[in-house]
Amino acid sequence: METRITKLLGIQYPIFQGGMAWVAEHQLAAAVSNAGGLGIIGAASAPAEIVREEIRKAKALTNKPFGVNVMLMNPNAEEVAKVVIEEGVKVVTTGAGNPAKFMDAWKEAGVKVIPVVASVAMAKLMERAGADAVVAEGTESGGHIGSATTMTLVPQVVDTVQIPVIAAGGIGDGRGVAAAMMLGAEAVQMGTRFIVAKESIVHANYKEKVIKAKDIDSVITGTSTGHPVRQIRNQMTKEYLRLEKEGASLEELEYLTLGALRKAVIEGDVVNGTLMAGQIAGLVAKEQTCQEMIEEIMAQAKVLLNK
């Protein structure tokens, strides 16, 4: 399935793996790239040298294109931006801010810059800043979210910008890929589905929660702070929502979630950890290799699009 995105990045399939903090490390990124998609290392709040190590480890596992997701709120973002150039990474996705101050250096180094956006206005701004494409991410996604749904956001972004659009949020199988293409997207980004990949380092307890989740098992916390996050319900979310309702301070809320994502991903604490996952968790039926997953998804999408 050839699109402007597959040609731009030199990938076989129009599938990106989301740059999830703690989850999107070198092993998963390399596996996705080897399977024909675009694997992405999530820099999150990691120091620049840790990101450099992850990039080099990914290079040892694949000779296919892969990217780095740069979270712009990271205090180390400027150093990470430089590491991307120094290590010859050719694709960057960005989140939590405006990458304009890094754009010239990245473009000069031949880096393809693909910001994640949650609104038409941000998509237009990113196009003017020189972005090569944008990921239009709907509120159905896991982790930090916007307010527009994928179904409404993607076609409006497609109608507004000339650069390619990647759809994200609520996409977990071939039906989602086909639907995104019908909305005008030229690729999709999936996060939750890759949490349960066999190559994913995510703890088995976390994977089991995603696989067993139902359609209504996710909840949004942090609305009062202006930084809403979608995750699977557990004791921690129950306590967080109680504190929010009682008007707790930002410091109290942050203390509750301190290290909670690592607890879930690495330690398997599904009671007090943060189980970031999108609303498609209910579609994830089993653990598969990235190769099996991507081939199954693309086969289903091709059948539907050919109809």
Image (tube, rainbow, N blue to C red):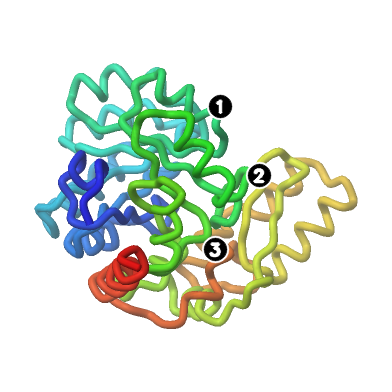
Q: Which residue is mark 1?
A: 121
| Residue at 59 percent of width and 77 percent of height | 213
Residue 277 marker: 3
In the picture, measured across the screen, residue 103 lies left or right of residue 251, that is: left
Q: Residue furthest right?
A: 246
- Identify residue type, mark 3: Ala
| Residue at 53 percent of width and 65 percent of height | 263
| Mark nearer the viewer, 1 or 3 | 1
Q: Secondary structure at mark 1?
A: helix
Residue 71 in the image, given as x and y percentages of width and height:
44, 38
Residue 62 in the image, given as x and y percentages of width and height:
13, 57
Work out whether 1 lies above or below 217: above
Work out whether 285 lies above or below 82: below
Q: Secondary structure at mark 3?
A: loop
Q: Which of the image's four quarters has the C terminus?
A: bottom left
Q: Secondary structure at mark 2?
A: loop
Q: Residue furthest front?
A: 307
Work out whether 294 lies above or below 66: below
Q: Which residue is mark 2?
A: 147
Q: Nearer the viewer, residue 217 or 175?
A: 175
